[in-house]
Structures are given as C-alpha cells and as structure tokens.
Image (cartoon, helix red, strand yellow):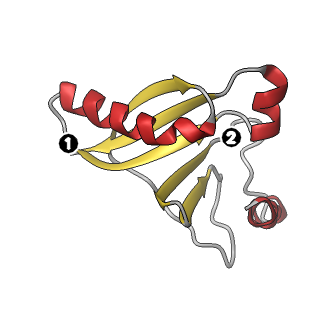
Amino acid sequence: MGSVMKKTWKKIVDAKADSEGEFALLSYDPSPWKGEHYFTITREVPNGENVRLSGTFLTKVFEGPYKEAGSWVEEMEAYVKSRDREMDKLYFYYTTCPKCAEHYGKNFVVGFARVK
C-alpha cells in the first residue's frame, strides 16, 4: 500500500494540487483485500480519479491499534443509530502512520460516517 500512496502523492504534488499543510486522507475499506483512499486536493489531478465527497457526516474519535477497526465500525454504527440516523458509508482518517503511532505511543483515528 505504501508504494500506491507514494505514487498517488507524487501525482498530486506534480499537479500542484496538494493543500500545503491542510491534509486529510480518508480511507474506505469494504473488505480486508480492497481499499479506497481519498486525498485532500486543491484542484483536479490529470489522469487521476478525481472525486468529490459530499453529504452529511457524523464523526467520532477512536484511540488504539489498527486491529481495533472492526470494533470501531460497530461503535460508529451504534453512534449513528443513537443520533437517529442511518449510516450510508464509513471512512476513517488515520492521524498517524503505523510507525508514528508506535513512536508516539498513541494512535488516534477519526470515523467519518456519511449518513442518511
């Protein structure tokens, strides 16, 4: 996955579409073998799959190792339901890479639930 991220980031930088300090990468993982990753960009990237995310979102912060993602999904579903909403799609924003989380001793992840 690291090589895909590097190639994608290079395309973004080469297109001068990086957001200069305001960065987010949302990940949608429909299965353990498939993932979609959405980078913050400031303009369309040539030969890139440019997507706009819109809607109403509820967010929740989690802390723990990446292996906890399954329980975070369940917690997000319960959280969304407690707000009388229905979850359409769930993205995660990983605030640190695995090596950084190990270095800092904390791993904060933000769940972004697009709701109906």
Front residue of 45 and 57: 57
Label 1: which residue?
Answer: 86
> Quadrant of the rendered structure where residue 12 is?
bottom right
The residue under the point 66% across, 33% down is 95
Image vertical order of residue 116 relative to residue 29, above or below: above
Give x and y (percent) for residue 6.
Answer: 82, 61
- What amino acid is at disc 2? Phe
Give x and y (percent) for residue 105.
Answer: 76, 20
Label 2: which residue?
Answer: 23
The local secondary structure at tag 1 comes to loop
Image vertical order of residue 49 relative to residue 90, above or below: below
The local secondary structure at tag 2 comes to loop
Find the residue positioned furthest to the left.
84
- What amino acid is at disc 1? Glu
> Quadrant of the rendered structure where residue 79 is?
top left
Q: Give the left or right position of residue 39, taking residue 71 as reference.
A: right
Q: CA distance from mark 1 to mark 2?
A: 28 Å
